[in-house]
Amino acid sequence: MEETARIKSFLKVIDEPIVNIKKLMKLSWHGIPFSIRYIIWKYLLRYIPVENKRVELVLKKKRNEYESLQKMLSFEATEIELKTKKQIKLDLVRSTTEVPFLFHEKAQEIMERVLFLWALRHPASGYVQGINDLIVPLFVVLLQEYSPLREKNVFDDVLEDDLKKVEADLYWCLSLLLEHVQDHYTSNQSKIFEQLASMKQLIIKIDQPLASHFEENNVECFQFAFRWFNCFLLREMSLEKGLRFWDTYLSDEDGNGFSQFHLYVCVAIIEKYSSKLMNMEFAEIMQFLQNLPSEEWTKCDVDALLSEAFILYKRFSSPDTHLQLSH
């Protein structure tokens, strides 16, 4: 019943002639019902306009634009581009086994085209491992518009024309998401190391005993948390929970959910297990943090984690605090 009421609240907002995006963000912060997530994410990513009557027109335009962009794929690839293509193929076969349809030939081809085209159009950064993880939640959510199934045979039920729409939407939504975190995916990934340094400083500020314990055991944040930033925790939990975290990230009013708020979520996770970690030594700490017991997290645990992260975010993310953190 609660789910039905929540769906109604969302539909009420998006049925307005002009969608109140702030209201939509406020609702989405607490999680989005799966059956309508595909349309809500399109609003939150600013893929579709808030003026309701323009939505279909904009979608048609973007989908046609994607079709034109695909012509780039027919040019003869350079040696570097062929290397990129090979890397993308290798990474895609390592996708999460939770979603069987990802391993269908059609799914692999769609993701490969989208990632390769994105890399071609962003030569300064190019394709970096980790971007392949970001495409999965988007694909799963966008395909929901045409089929609720996740089995490998889902493509038997989806029309070819609808698949083309999904592919175009996937390309644009991934591009919009990466605009916020593109500096995570440069060749040296310096932004991630910057965030790892901030993470260390935050732990020192809010939990000095744990920071000292980490130091005594030679524990460095990059040893366990690089993947947390590179894949935005997607490899640390079930896809269902990952989607829930992303609902909140996409609801950040300033568009900093992935680029800033995520850091505080990572710190909140460490804080959740602070007393446990204090009783462990290096090998145990590594084993634990590289294999978080996220399958135990209930809906209440996830909500509490995100709320705790939000408190830290508001407390430490002002420009003045950032200056203090970096020294």
Image (tube, rainbow, N blue to C red):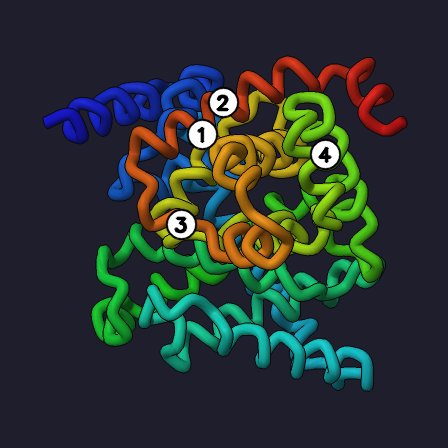
> Foreground mark, 1 or 4?
4
Label 3 element class: loop
The residue lying at 76 percent from left, 64 percent from top is: 126
Residue at the disc numbered 1: 305
Image quadrant of residue 324?
top right
Quadrant of the frame with the N terminus: top left
Label 4 element class: helix
State the image coordinates of residue 320 (x, y, percent, origin top left).
82, 14
N-terminal label among 2 and 3: 3
The residue lying at 55 percent from left, 47 percent from top is: 280
Q: CA–CA distance between discs 1 and 3?
A: 14 Å
> Foreground mark, 1 or 3?
3
Residue 125, relative to residue 108: is it above or below? above
Label 2 element class: helix
Q: CA–CA distance between discs 2 and 4?
A: 22 Å
Residue at the disc numbered 2: 308
Q: Assess whether mark 1 and mark 2 are in contact (beta carbons under 8 angstroms).
A: yes
N-terminal label among 2 and 4: 4
Q: CA–CA distance between discs 2 and 1?
A: 5 Å
Q: Relative to the observer, which residue lies in front, 222 or 147? A: 222
The residue lying at 59 percent from left, 80 percent from top is: 90
The label on residue 138 is none
Q: Assess whether mark 3 and mark 1 are in contact (beta carbons under 8 angstroms).
A: no
Q: Amino acid at mark 2?
A: Glu
Residue at the disc numbered 3: 293
N-terminal label among 1 and 3: 3
The label on residue 212 is 4
N-terminal label among 4 and 3: 4
The residue lying at 45 percent from left, 38 percent from top is: 245
Q: Amino acid at mark 4?
A: Ser
